[in-house]
Image (cartoon, helix red, strand yellow):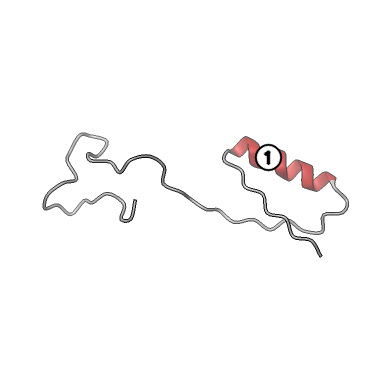
Amino acid sequence: MTVVEHVVDSPAGLRHLVARVRADRHVVAFPYRQVRELVGDEPQRCGTGHSYVGVSATRPVPDW
């Protein structure tokens, strides 16, 4: 049995991949899982401009 893993980074890429494996009669199953990855620099301020630095109940995502 051969197992191949594909990674897509957009809904359009996922649609294309699913359509391709559905059309392939050799594919028996295609289980999937969602993985989220943080991209970019850790934010210093929230969306409304409040600082994440200092004593606060609101913190940026740990282990950015």
x, y percent for residue 27: 82, 54
Q: Is residue 8 above or below residue 34?
A: above
For this orientation, the residue located farthest to the left is 55
x, y percent for residue 8: 61, 43
Quarter of the N terminus within the rendering: bottom right
x, y percent for residue 25: 88, 51
For this orientation, the residue located farthest to the bottom is 1
Q: Is residue 56 above or below residue 10?
A: below
**Are there few (<14), some (14-19), or many (20+) residues within 10 Å of tag 1?**
few
**Count of marks placed on residues:** 1
Q: Is residue 28 above or below residue 23?
A: below
Residue 44, image quadrant? top left
Residue at image coords 30%, 55%: 62
| Label 1 sits on residue | 15
Residue at image coords 33%, 55%: 63
Q: Is residue 23 left or right of residue 17?
A: right
Identify residue type, mark 1.
Answer: Arg
Q: Circle 1 sits in a helix, a strand or a loop, which is it? A: helix
x, y percent for residue 58: 21, 51
- Between 58 and 61, the residue placed more toward the observer is 61
Q: Is residue 33 left or right of residue 51?
A: right
Q: Is residue 42 left or right of residue 45?
A: right
Q: Is residue 48 left or right of residue 37?
A: left
